[in-house]
Image (tube, grey):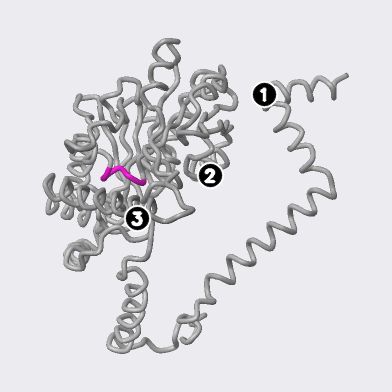
Amino acid sequence: LYGAGCLASEIRENGLGETVLAIAKKTPIIKDIIEKELAKVKSKAEEMALTSKEVLEYKVNSELPSKGVSREVLMKDLTKWEEIERSKYSRGQTSGTVYHGDRSLADFAGDVMKMFCLANPLHPSTFPFVQKMEAEVVAMTLKIFQGTSKDHCGLTTSGGTESILMAMKAYREKGYAKGIRRPEIVACVTVHAAFDKAADYFGMKLVHVPFDRRTYQADISAIKNAVTRSTVVIVCSAPCYAQGIIDPVEEVASFIEENDLDVGLHVDCCLGGFLAPFVRIMDERKGLPKFDFSVKQVTSISADTHKYGYSPKGTSVLMYASRELRRMQYFTAPRWTGGIYATPSAAGSRPGAVIAATWAVMMHMGLEGYMDASREIMQTADTIKKGIGGIEGLEVM
């Protein structure tokens, strides 16, 4: 009877399909198959790391040289390696890796990084101007996303994954404060895999819902059915990584408001965060739906500056509609023997160089620069779309 009760409880919490799958994974035969396949994947990943044809032509340095190598010799190799890697994306045949082809802008960002290569925002009294630049990067990004009230706030992170992790950590803490044992995230199967990582890291449950087969947007009916008392946040993409589709943020917001739900609404704009807002205000793109803080129920947004913001890797901005929610992602260790230790995100020390370069690139681009770049990108997309339409057997989904 006890076993049956536990099984019933598990089905209620996780659903029949997930419970059956979990049980199957624990059986010796299935467990052995899964472990073998995972081992193959890991082995393949390790092989790929050092089996590039160009890399194999060079000596592998598995230990420190007994005597330091001269700068001239090192720069010779580094210059060659950079040229090889740059040739891979400079031909315009790489998607989702490098987002700006202007060499002069990259050189400018590199010059700024060199100036601040020792800066660490963990020590704001020593590096006050890095702190100033970070605050201004956040403020400028908030303005782009209509975060204009005194409550809107944010911080920079190392990239989209950390922004997503930190946001989900904040919602988890909010769930814990409400007495929820295992807080749940509701998101479409098209969301970034970093949400799976967040659920795995923080002991949360990620409830995946299907997408509409016609529009490729998250299925709003499925979202409504997936929300439970344990749900702490619903996630929408603007756009999602694989399909480039903006989920129905306004419809999800209306659902939250109409049912007076104490549930967060996170919008992941990591991919198109510095493209979609500018496209939306172009005259010819007025039909683009709302996805920012102008939608009242949106409680957090993640947007990568190192993609269409054209800053160096890796920088991202995580924004919140309230300071209380942002505080829930912080970590503090007040009893450490070295004194009070507190960090706003996952990292302790952070590279002030990329913050400074991000600030410099954003100031240099300005609103006009981002608008011009966004217009060119959309014109290119239209050209590709038209070309696909002219090829028999192909269609734009």
Judge by depth and name the residue closer to the eye, 335 or 304.
304
Q: CA separation, marks 2 and 1?
A: 20 Å
The percent position of residue 387, horizontal first and vertical second, equals: 35, 55
Span shown in magenta: 271-275
Magenta part, dominant SS:
loop
**Of the two numbered discs 1 and 3 in the rendering, the one whose residue sits closer to the viewer:** 3
For marks 2 and 1 on the same chain, the one whose residue lies earlier in the sequence: 1
Judge by depth and name the residue closer to the eye, 185 or 176.
185
User: Residue tagged by mark 3?
Assistant: 387
Q: Amino acid at mark 3?
A: Gly
Left or right: where 164 falls relative to 50: left
Q: Do the numbered discs 3 and 2 sit on residues whose CB atoms are within 8 Å? A: no
Left or right: where 294 falls relative to 12: left
Q: Amino acid at mark 2?
A: Lys
Which element carries disc 2, helix, strand or loop? helix
The percent position of residue 72, horizontal first and vertical second, equals: 27, 88
Quadrant position of residue 44: bottom right
Mark carried by residue 197: 2
